[in-house]
Image (cartoon, coloured by chain):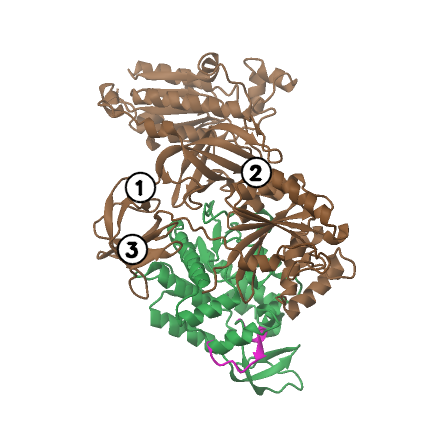
Amino acid sequence: MPLTEHLRRLEAESIFILRETVAEFQNPVLLYSIGKDSSVLLHLARKAFYPAKPPFPLLHVDTTWKFRDMIAFRDETVARLGLDLRIHVNQEGISRGVSPVASGSALHTQVMKTEGLRQALDKWGFDAALGGARRDEEKSRAKERIFSHRTAAQGWDPKNQRPELWRVFDTRLARGESMRVFPLSNWTELDVWRYVAAENIPVAPLYFARPRPVVRRDGALIMVDDDRLPLRPGEKPEWRSVRFRTLGCYPLTGAIESEAADVAAVIAEMRAATTSERQGRLIDFDESGSMERKKREGYF
Amino acid sequence: MAPPALRFLTCGSVDDGKSTLIGRLLYERSLICDDQLANLERDSKKFGTTGAAVDFALLVDGLEAEREQGITIDVAYRYFSTDKRSFIVADCPGHEQYTRNMATGASHCDLAVLLVDARKGLLAQTHRHANIVALLGVRHVVLAVNKMDLVDYDRAAFARIVAQFEAARAALNFLSVTPIPLSARHGDNVCRPSANMPWHDGPDLLGFLETVDVEDRAARPLRFPVQWVNRPDADFRGLAGTLASGCVAKGDEIVVAASGGRSRVARIVAMGGDLDRAEAPDSVTLVFADEIDASRGDLLCDPRHRPEVADQFAADLIWMSEEALYPGRSYLLKCGGNCLPASVTEIKYRLDVETQAQIAAKKLGLNEIGFCNLALSRPIAFDAYADNRVTGGFILIDRATHGVAAAGVIRFALRRAQNVHPQALSLDKARRAALKRQKPALLWFTGLSGAGKSTIANLVEVALARRGVHTALLDGDNVRHGLNKDLGFTEADRVENIRRVGEVAKLMLDAGLIVLCAFISPFAAERRMARELVARDEFVEIFIDTPLATCIARDPKGLYQKALAGQIKNFTGVDQAYERPEAADIVIGADCVEAQQAADRIVGWLDARGFLAPD
């Protein structure tokens, strides 16, 4: 399927940003979170540097609570494409017993994702981290730069962002500072799916409807992916045809009931949707400003 | 095929309803999801300014500070689509102190929706924004006269504002201006024609945005800024980049603008298979028939239509830093893949954005716009911004803070850069220095007034003369009696003072001398400028680190006494800062109290590094 003019321009822009990152930084990394945005980002990176392989490693900050299908998809992707994947787990968090079940979403996210990411960036000395975040996901993301500066403590200062004109990016860093780079900034969820369809990009099977064991909890459908999820009194997993709009830690990621079993069906379903993508993300829900607060602390 | 997404911005004075308009557009098109609407209703009760009604501005004002203060601080990008078109909206701040963010938004857009409050008409900020969008090359404007409900949908009120804008737009070079009367709060003429304004025979806003054609149809010549050299192995060398304009086909001849090197396009490489042709704004990788010497920063182009290549040009600058612009100060200029030292040599005028008046200026402050001459450390290839928004736009980066100091749009290359070519000389610095059996060096003494710079520099020169070394000493006070007697002590004049001294020292270095410069030189930026005038290993920064209290106690010229009494303004250490060098080559501190001891140490340092022939 040929790309629409709109997607062709988005693709060209993202490729430009990826190349700019490689040209301007010493030690970039691509944050690979296994989701559809990461799949698209990885595909664009392959295009940007073809016939060379993407000249940076992939980093997965593993909270150890991802869906099993995500990990399988990750390992299969890396093997198929012959990529250099670095995996980091916040061992200190593990030894403290932090988990989404025991600690709640806020602490788990803070320790296993935000702190884990900071540890990994420090460990390998990455000065630029490419991520698949989009501005249409959430309000504070809507104001984030494509090249988004981070202090030496990995913090974000939303009130003091560098102006970003045309495609001329100010990539200068002082010692210890780093950059987060978002090549998909101008894509919408629908753009991502249309591009997945047009370019035939493999995505994790969890995006497609299939009977899965779920429990209804606090208004969300939570998949019982393994036996670590303690069932509350009266909860009994039932098999329903569900899929996921975004992927994260399975106890924190709500499924939607759906029959959409392929990309075309997903696109059709999304066009009729009346809820936003991050609705399934329990970690965003505390308050409207909560994403901004997490990002200031270093969350992606 | 569907037209490409329309990138537009909303701008206008604060409280004219920009965010409300976007919120309304999204709401009317059912583009607000249920969970977002639930958030919005909750937030409206908490922060809203609309009483019981939903406050649409809260949809787009994403940052906490914005929600608390009820204003838009930063550009927010919003995305929506209808059956006819996709839209990317830059929602820009109205407050004057955020003008730089508004310019940022405009640089990405082809159309501006300029909001005006029907009750207030055109305000200073409206003119400012019209000027900025025009300066940044936005050629299509919707004049959205908002809050028509508050003037009883009065046709005459609308007509007055339209006429007012017509008078102002003459100088702004817009291709189209489309006036639309509307009410963002109530939805009139936003997504459908308003029953309240049957007299309006033009389109409603969304209907217009869906169909407006903003594509640049002019045939532009090929511009391919080389972004990255792709060389995975010895067999492949490709130049990766994004076409800034024009198109390129297999077999086309191209030229590297700055060097004049030529070749033919052998392949246009893409992952899905080679292409025969690519056009702006495609991102591609080109392989050439010959090994051409080109790398990041080079501009490949059509040999028949070449860009300018120069190291001086005239440009409009939008100043974005809290720290004012002073001519002569060194910045990093980033244009395409080039990032190089540059300075403003002259501010021709500052633009009064309300009246378009051209005002003489010695500096540019935050949010001010000035027309300036710039000099670069080497020639680069570029186009006028009016011809090409990619190859004609640049930023200046502050070298200390690494922040964006300014956005610039190039008007034209300066003729003197085209016609003044460096004269190649038969004798060079190395030959001249070899005759003297010495290595040229610039010894830069910096420190507070009274620190002992001149005393120590003088002793060093005496010691060098005994060794048969040819030297020259430029001293702050002496230079100000002659070469720089037209300069005072303002920040701007201090910058120029050091620039001239640096250039003179450079000429003396070319003559093979060891040059000693003793200047307070309080600003790191100017010391860096002097350092960059000469070769890397020729500059020796010597910091005479005498405490301020000691200098005041010495006060050899009685100047501190006067400065402390308020009789001298801009006195370093009293009412003007001294920026301490962070990495001086030699620091003369408390361990070196005697001037002769300091001089001996400096001579020893030069000896150890081979600047002086053995005795």
C-alpha separation, residue under disc 1 versus residue under disc 3: 18 Å
Q: Earlier in the sequence, mark 1 or mark 3?
A: 3
Q: Is residue B356 above or below residue B555?
A: below
* Element class at badge 3: strand
The local secondary structure at tag 2 comes to helix
Residue A24, given in percent of the width and then of the height, sits at: 40, 49
B475 up-or-down from B346: above or below: above
Please indicate, yes or no, whether residue A212 appears anywhere in the rendered image.
yes
B342 relative position to B274: left or right: right
Q: Are marks 2 and 1 in contact (CB under 8 Å)?
A: no
Q: Which mark identifies residue B257?
A: 1
Dot 1: element: loop
- Give how far across and how far down residue A269 sits, in percent: 55, 76
Magenta residues, as a range? A248-263
Look at chain B in the picture and name its colour: brown
Q: Is residue A262 magenta?
A: yes
Q: Which residue is mark 2?
A: B170
The crowd level at tag 1 (other Cα within 10 Å; few <14, some 14-19, many 20+) is many
Q: Residue B592 location in percent, x, y?
A: 46, 24
The residue tagged 3 is: B249
* Residue type pointed to by label 2: Ala
Which marked residue is nearer to the observer: mark 2 or mark 1? 2
Q: Which mark is residue A21?
A: none
Spatial CA distance of label 3 from label 2 is 40 Å
Q: Which amino acid type is shown beneath numbered disc 1?
A: Ala
